[in-house]
Image (spheres, grey):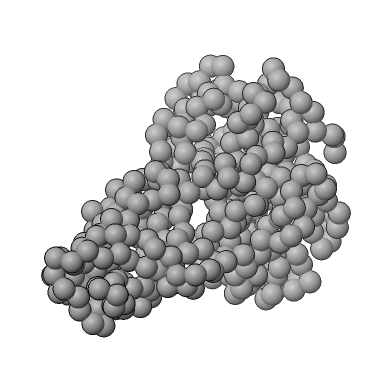
């Protein structure tokens, strides 16, 4: 391993890291979730997705107070709780971050003048493993994978990927849709390991060449995997991990996902104001904390997630379908089912119960 270096000619001093929440500081959904492995999704640290398929293996995913000194006080930890040593062909377990095409234009991929990409990260595990780090071009179905090793101590890996000039026909789309995935391959069957690892240059995807040579995270319930300080930047040099104010990181994460009444709890929270449209229905505004990437999917924790008030009386909600007119900036409460009704024409405000939540999800 080499030490991190600063090279102002390669990338700017601020904003060079294209990874969001690489220090694992933000976890709006939960700090820990058990029994994972049956389904893909976002569970703990924001912007970090689990992709899985076909395996009987299970794990706990945690935002953990551990990290290399001076880099981050937090890391993302995976703890194998159910082993799977009989690996079927299509099995896979990946830790993933997805990138909007419009945030990748600095790479210039697929055309003359395309630039190299360097990914750096801090990793450790319960033992020595070999895993894979793949960059996957969603727009043009092209990929490249490099292997890395773990030890029981924090080690920084710096991996440079060649420029993909191609024939000038495979640039990233300039839009807010997913254009590239960064995949950490932790487990895979022969569908993904049966060929020859594509490591030298970008190539049109062949699944069998994506994860050749990796070990299995699911080989034992003793296995743990820890990662933090993840950075992706333009150029051939891994610069020092970019330290970012947690408020800036949170705002970036909220472009994709917003949680009201966060998992840390607290008192009941006021979330909207409006009026009784009728004695059984309320219209009110719900503003997002930040404009989102796209129109989000709205959800609440349960039918009795909150209250609306009528002259001091708390009217409990009794419905989960409570949002209409959803945009990237706001949504409208249209709440039509209550345990007790209010008075048409009166003003009201809406309160979210402690321990309940409202989610707005615009993830890639």
Horizontal side of 11 relative to 6 (left or right) equals left
Quadrant of the rendered image containing residue 128: bottom right
Q: Residue at x 70, y 70 (%)?
A: 80
Image quadrant in which the N terminus is located: top right
Horizontal side of 20 relative to 175 (left or right) equals right
Quadrant of the rendered image containing residue 60: bottom right
Quadrant of the rendered image containing residue 18: top right
**Residue 52 visible somewhere in the drawing:** no
* Residue 50 at x, y percent in the picture: 56, 59
* Residue 343 at x, y percent in the picture: 16, 73
Q: Residue at x 65, y 70 (%)?
A: 59
Horizontal side of 282 relative to 93 (left or right) equals left
**Residue 299 visible somewhere in the drawing:** yes
Q: Residue at x 79, y 28 (%)?
A: 5
Q: Residue furthest bottom?
A: 339
* Residue 346 at x, y percent in the picture: 18, 66
Choose between 278 and 147: the one closer to the eye.
278
Q: Residue at x 36, y 73 (%)?
A: 306
In the image, residue 112 above or below residue 198: above
Total marks shown come to: 0
In the image, residue 129 above or below residue 145: below
* Residue 216 at x, y percent in the picture: 71, 62
């Amino acid at each position: 391993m080499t030490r991190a270096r600063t090279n102002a000619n390669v990338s700017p001093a601020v904003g060079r890291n294209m990874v969001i929440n690489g220090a694992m500081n933000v976890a709006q959904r939960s700090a820990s979730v058990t029994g994972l492995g049956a389904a893909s999704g976002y569970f703990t640290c924001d912007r970090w997705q689990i992709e899985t398929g076909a395996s009987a293996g299970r794990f706990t995913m945690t935002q953990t107070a551990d990290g290399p000194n001076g880099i981050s006080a937090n890391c993302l930890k995976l703890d194998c709780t159910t082993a799977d040593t009989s690996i079927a062909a299509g099995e896979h377990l990946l830790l993933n971050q997805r990138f909007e095409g419009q945030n990748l234009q600095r790479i210039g991929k697929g055309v003359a003048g395309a630039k190299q990409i360097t990914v750096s990260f801090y990793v450790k595990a319960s033992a020595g493993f070999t895993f894979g780090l793949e960059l996957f071009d969603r727009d043009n179905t092209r990929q490249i994978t490099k292997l890395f090793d773990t030890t029981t101590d924090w080690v920084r890996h710096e991996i440079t990927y060649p420029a993909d000039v191609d024939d000038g026909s495979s640039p990233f789309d300039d839009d807010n849709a997913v254009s590239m995935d960064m995949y950490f391959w932790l487990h895979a069957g022969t569908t993904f390991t049966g060929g020859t690892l594509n490591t030298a240059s970008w190539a049109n995807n062949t699944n069998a060449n994506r994860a050749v040579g990796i070990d299995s995270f699911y080989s034992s319930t003793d296995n743990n995997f820890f990662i933090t300080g993840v950075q992706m930047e333009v150029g051939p040099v891994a610069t020092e991990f970019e330290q970012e104010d947690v408020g800036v990181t949170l705002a970036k994460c909220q472009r994709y996902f917003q949680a009201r009444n966060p998992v840390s709890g607290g008192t009941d929270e006021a979330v909207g104001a409006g009026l009784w449209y009728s004695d059984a229905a309320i219209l009110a505004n719900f503003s997002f904390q930040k404009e989102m990437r796209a129109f989000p999917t709205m959800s609440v924790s349960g039918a009795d997630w909150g209250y609306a008030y009528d002259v001091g009386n708390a009217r409990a909600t009794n419905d989960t379908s409570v949002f209409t007119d959803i945009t990237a900036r706001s949504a409208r409460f249209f709440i039509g089912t209550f345990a007790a009704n209010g008075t048409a024409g009166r003003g009201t405000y809406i309160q979210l119960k402690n321990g309940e939540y409202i989610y707005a999800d615009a993830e890639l």
